[in-house]
Amino acid sequence: MNIKACLFDLDGVIVDTAKYHYLAWKRLASELGFDFTEKDNERLKGVSRMASLEILLSIGNMEMEEKSKLELAEKKNQWYVEYISKVDKSELLPGVEDFFKLLKENEIKIALGSASKNSMTILKNTGIVGYFDAIIDGNKVSKAKPDPEVFVLGAKELGVSSEECVVFEDAEAGIEAAKSANMKAIGVGSPEILNKADKIISGFSGISLDILNF
Ligand code: B16
Ligand code: MG
């Protein structure tokens, strides 16, 4: 089957926004009176905002009512939005934009499949929004990865079948989502975490269209 579309996760694949999520969550933990380490932050990658807050609160052994949780999530998000307002093209991960150009030249469609509700700010600030034929993010989906919803919706908006799609993901839950959607999955990152992927790459530098041959 010929590949007609590539679907990209955002954080950890196109741009490293995890460091800004980390800064904002750490600031929140510090206000609540406990420490939050970079290792703890690994557990939040690819996880939705409210699910991330639950993990953070469990690390601090804290329980609270729903209303307070929503207020804390909002506070964290305001800090995060402030950090990403300064993001620019220089923060694109190496080789990503060249790979987008290659896909466009070969008429392969591009979609975003991200859990983030802030994806548009990041795509605009890095100057890459124009490459996308479809943008599916946390504002459009209700079920978090590993549920396949985000990628299924992506294929639907692009007008391609799932067998014609390749997903690029840095999180284990994202690879699982791609496989459940019946798509090919390419892991971006370390083989220890991404062993369920069909292929693994360390990044996009020097990647050719051969990567789409399965
Ligand atoms: P927001 P991805 C995910 O992005 C991040 O990896 C995760 O850490 C974050 O909590 C989630 O987006 C929601 O982000 O708070 O901006 O809506 O990897 O799915 O692109
Ligand atoms: Mg990610």
Image (cartoon, rainbow, N blue to C red):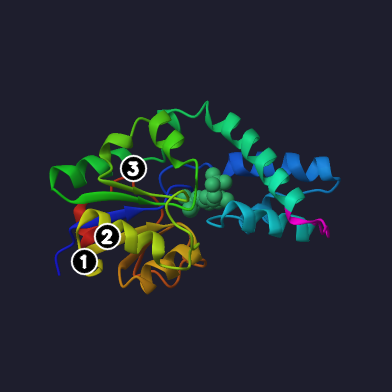
Amino acid on which the number 1 mark rests in the picture = Ser
**Residue at point 82%, 59% (across, down):** 63
Residues under labels 3 and 2: Cα distance? 21 Å
Q: Earlier in the sequence, mark 1 or mark 3?
A: 3
Q: Which residue is drawn at the image coordinates 49% and 40% (left, top)?
A: 118
In the picture, the disc for residue 155 is: 2
On screen, residue 214 versus residue 86, left or right, reads left
Find out whether the residues at labels 3 and 2 contact each other: C-beta distance under 8 Å.
Answer: no
The answer to whether 126 is drawn above or below residue 203 in the figure is: above
Mark nearer the viewer, 3 or 2: 2
Q: Mark 1 and mark 2 in contact? Answer it, CB < 8 Å.
A: yes
Going 67% across and 46% down the picture, which residue do you hit?
Answer: 73
In the foreground, 168 or 82 = 82
Mark identifier at residue 161: 1
Callout 1: 10 Å neighbours few (<14), some, many (20+)? some
Residue span colored magenta: 60-66
In the rendered image of this protein, does residue 176 appear above or below residue 127? below
Q: CA distance from mark 1 to mark 3?
A: 24 Å
Residue 202 seen in the current view: yes
CA distance separating discs 1 and 2: 6 Å
